[in-house]
Image: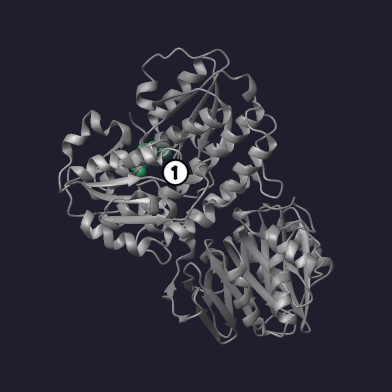
Amino acid sequence: MCGIIGIVGTAPVADRLVDSLKRLEYRGYDSAGVATLEHGRLDRRRAEGKLRNLEKVLREAPLEGRIGIGHTRWATHGRPSVANAHPHATTQVAVVHNGIIENFRELRDELLEAGANFESETDTEVVAHLVSREMRDGRSAVDAVAASLPRLRGAFALAFLFDGDEDLLIGARKGSPLALGYGDGEMYLGSDALALAPFTDTISYLDDGDWAVLRHGSIEVRDAANNKVSRPIQKAAASAFMVEKGNHRHFMAKEIHEQPEVVGHTLAHYLDMASETVRLPADLPFDFAKLDRISIAACGTAYYAGLVAKYWFERYARLPVEIDVASEFRYREAPLPKNGLAIVISQSGETADTLASLRYAKENGQHVLAVVNVPTSTIARDSHVVMPTLAGPEIGVASTKAFTCQLATLAAIAVAAGRARGVLSVAEERELVHALVEVPRLMSEALSLGPEIEVLARTLMKAKDVLYLGRGTAFPLALEGALKLKEISYIHAEGYAAGELKHGPIALIDEKMPVVVLAPHDGVFEKTMSNVQEVVARGGRIILITDGNGSKAAGIGTEATLTLPEMHPAIAPLVYAVPIQLLAYHTAVHMGTDVDQPRNLAKSVTVE
Ligand code: M6R
């Protein structure tokens, strides 16, 4: 996750760009840079490390331009260095970027063949060369960006500055956020409202797939299909930037939509995306190769993240996992292996039962690794190793982005364990990392099911009970789907392993009972479908969540089928989380419940 800022100004912008970047430093700080037009020509200054280094460079070689873009970086592709710092530029265009361009390798090869000269190891530089090539082919700057954006795969936000044009900035968003600011004869863009706060409180947010053309007197927004669109303009309370809802009606909606961005950020923390390897801290106090067992304890949604991770650790690292809800683990006096590893998972880092489990594990000689979202929390402080989830503050009581960031972190740990234990080869590690890199884009695609799910939720809201079914990693996801629905819509819901159906819950099935089936087209798909047949035979109503191949192969009549893109089975839990969150969200909204603060619940459960 990087920070982006851009100003179409009436006075020199370099100092203002840097001031804004200071507000964005929380998004990354391994290098920074700005580009402006000096007498119409592109010029840039970049520095490795904190912003003070960039300030020093600018003091020694100031920039006077009245239009510019700036960037603070969190390295994904390529180590922190001046050469890899943004903006990346050709003679025609400079670009800053937040996110991941998944297909950068193939684009780079194509551009290299066409004679492009690359100066960095980043994925971003391909964007500058792509737009440049379009401009050399005779397209205007705006048309060149319009032609280039559809070629980019991934989740990203971009800002462009063009040589020779003092009245043009272009911003684009697909997955990663971008806000627009309206001033008096000046226009702005930035990663969040806080970055724009010194200049304006009149803000709008780009929707996914939008791109915007900024000039001194106007901003024109276009959607992914290139239609002119207008997005609501609002007054931002920038002091509360982290807890603003943006264009969303509820924090939960905002947090669901933030997932491509924050999961990308979390993955960038643990993966070296250029070499497609996992990069955990070098000084871990234990060796995965010497562990006999992992014990996991957590509560609620965090427990379900642990349950998914159990499948990953056992499959990819051949490491047995014991997992308990923390309220049971703390009292059941489980014997723990000498020198074993305990993993506790918590968004808040303050959950009383999880904390007590951590202490029990410590007293029993375990190394304790915490996967937490609040790095200053008690659980983080009390653990031997902290692997942060970089979800940012989660305000909605129903956990969404914290869950998928927990999954991202646990997936990286499982792959690292698999490599350390010699279970995964270099090629297998690369394949899994490659799959993880695709998650932010796939999540964005899953989010586009929103309108379909909103319609479906109108039916679901009439149900008294709902059953969720899944096999493999889709089983914990079924549990999570049921939890999400019951906690915010108050509809009774249960999650079951699909194979357990005929051992009891099938008695509940009748023509009134919606059954949500999570079934990626993977190795257990056919088994799940056999269970679905059993439901259909008893008049049950099926809502199938699957992929293109799954929907072709299902061969059953469903009340609705939500079709996700094809993906590597390992990453399915991260992407399938999105439709189940949306389904719960829209059902609750239709029912008029208090989505962000559902009755009887607290965000942080500090009592047992
Ligand atoms: O802060 P924690 O992750 O430790 O919280 C654990 C559970 O209380 C939490 O996940 C809860 O189940 C959520 N409300 C679920 O949406």
Residue 281, horizontal then vertical, whole percent: 66, 35
For residue 234, above or below residue 551: below
Q: Nearer the viewer, residue 4 or 151?
A: 151
Ligand 1, by image quadrant, is: top left
Q: Nearer the viewer, residue 96 or 105?
A: 105
Q: Image quadrant of residue 171? A: bottom right
For residue 40, above or below residue 567: below
Q: Nearer the viewer, residue 579 or 330?
A: 579
Q: Quadrant of the N terminus?
A: bottom right
Q: Amino acid at mark 1?
A: Phe
Residue drawn at point x = 49 percent, y = 41 percent: 407
Residue 191, horizontal then vertical, whole percent: 56, 64
Residue drawn at point x = 15 percent, y = 48 percent: 511
Residue drawn at point x = 64 percent, y = 64 percent: 97
Q: Disc 1 marks which residue?
A: 403
Residue 390, horizontal then vertical, whole percent: 54, 46
Q: Is residue 97 left or right of residue 388?
A: right
Q: Is residue 279 visible?
A: no
How crowded pointer 1 is (Cα within 10 Å; few <14, some 14-19, many 20+) is rated as: many
Some atom of ligand 1 lies within 8 Å of the CB belonging to the residue at label 1: yes
Q: Is residue 136 left or right of residue 170?
A: right
- Tally of numbered tags: 1
Q: Quadrant of the C terminus?
A: top left
